[in-house]
Amino acid sequence: MRTKSLKKNKINVVTLGCSKNVYDSEVLMGQLRANNKEVVHEEEGNVVVINTCGFIANAKEESVNTILEYVQRKEAGDVDKVFVTGCLSERYKPDLEKEISNVDEYFGTSELPNLLKALGADYKHELIGERLTTTPKNYAYLKIAEGCDRPCSFCAIPIMRGKHRSTPIEELVSESEKLAAKGVKELILIAQDLTYYGLDLYKKRNLAELLQALVKVEGIEWIRLHYAFPTGFPMDVLDVMKKESKICNYIDIPLQHIADPILKSMRRGTTKAKTTRLLKDFRAAVPEMAIRTTLIVGYPGETEEDFKTLKDWVKEMRFERLGCFTYSHEENTHAYSLEDDVPEEVKQQRANEIMEVQSQISWELNQDRIGKTFKCIIDRKEGNHFVGRTEFDSPDVDNEVLIDATKHYVKTGDFVQVKITEASDFDLYGEPVT
């Protein structure tokens, strides 16, 4: 049997799932560092903390496989301890404890103090806003609220994250100032639902007021909005977007579907007519805005007619950015009582068809950018290219601007004016303009 080393423990935090999990891992790492613990992100360490995702089938499978991988490494003596936290652990803790018993301890999404205690650290309340960021130095996620009050039939997030809880404006401003001091230039605002922000604290939708406070933070040049819900969207946000140059002309508004029977069953609280009108109001208020959405195909009861309605609508609306997912039948959700009656291969075919439509739209929109110059942030160098983004693109999910590194030099983390010379369906190619 392996003799455990006497050296100081190195804690490896492994993050799975969405940007909200990235944020939570960064907070955990900031607390550990403040406790003088040696902590790394997805590198080698003899103590492992896995921050899991439990949203849909593929994410759950990846989380379980990662837990099993580290448990096997523990049994082989390569790591000493394995702890599991995050959404999967929150949702399935009793099952996980029974099925994968060799994990040292499981923690839910709101048990950070207990997790820190297990790691030999104290939760420091004075560290509000302190994080060890894992993203490239030029951007960071800013989680403005936790949980969700929406009743969407397909979604398990309220089970895992609880009710909506907004973070006070002054705390978010303070956190943003600390990020800016570290060189962060772009804030990506995240929550389960940005548009609900403030209803619990201020008794009104207060996203616009938060934005007006954040634009005053020195050093922050871009503020990007992710995950806005279409019902009850606070239109004063668009006024601030138009007025304040720091707020990117970009919004991520997951619409999920558009056929009225599906919207009703999904409990989305809207209709095709209302959603279409909302998007037209967006375009009228901020004509240059890039709208990103995500859609679900294969929801229970989705007929060929429902799918055709969705596909035709995607062609009509010409979203700048779009992702499409197949429906995942999740226990303890309202939709779980429905029959998951669309075959898997049909779901996948429908998703492919939507993305083929979007690929063509994206190609056409990108062709219009050739010859134009855009302000880009340079995220990284990859192979023979510097990789950047325009204000119309979020990291990891949207288009990228590629600059030939054999011909041009730009500094990562900097803003650069780039003239677009070529375009494919999801990438732009350009040259820096001096």
Image (cartoon, rainbow, N blue to C red):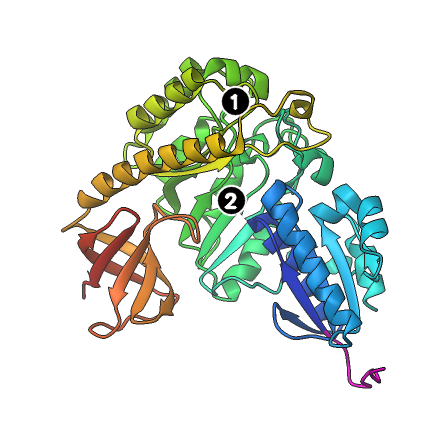
Residue located 37% across and 20% down the image: 308
Q: Is residue 413 above or below residue 352?
A: below
Residue located 32% across and 51% down the image: 390
Q: SS class of the residue under badge 1?
A: loop
Q: Earlier in the sequence, mark 1 or mark 2?
A: 2
Q: Which contiguous range is marked in magenta?
A: 1-10
Q: Nearer the viewer, residue 11 or 91?
A: 91
User: Could you tell me what secondary structure mostly forms the magenta stretch?
Assistant: loop
Q: Is residue 136 above or below residue 295?
A: below
Q: CA distance from mark 1 to mark 2?
A: 24 Å
Residue assigned mark 1: 231
Q: SS class of the residue under badge 2?
A: helix
Identity, as a three-letter code, of the amino acid under mark 1? Thr
Q: Locate residue 70, reporting x and y percent.
A: 71, 65
Residue projecting furthest to the left: 371
Q: For residue 359, what is the image quadrant? A: top left
Q: For residue 305, what is the image quadrant? A: top left
Q: Locate residue 347, reporting x and y percent.
A: 48, 31
Q: Quadrant of the C terminus?
A: bottom left
Residue 221 visible at all: yes
Residue assigned mark 2: 213
**In the image, residue 282 lies in the stretch drawn in magenta:** no
**In the image, residue 2 lies in the stretch drawn in magenta:** yes
Residue located 47% across and 30% down the image: 346
Image depth: mark 1 or mark 2 in front: 1
Residue 164 visible at all: no
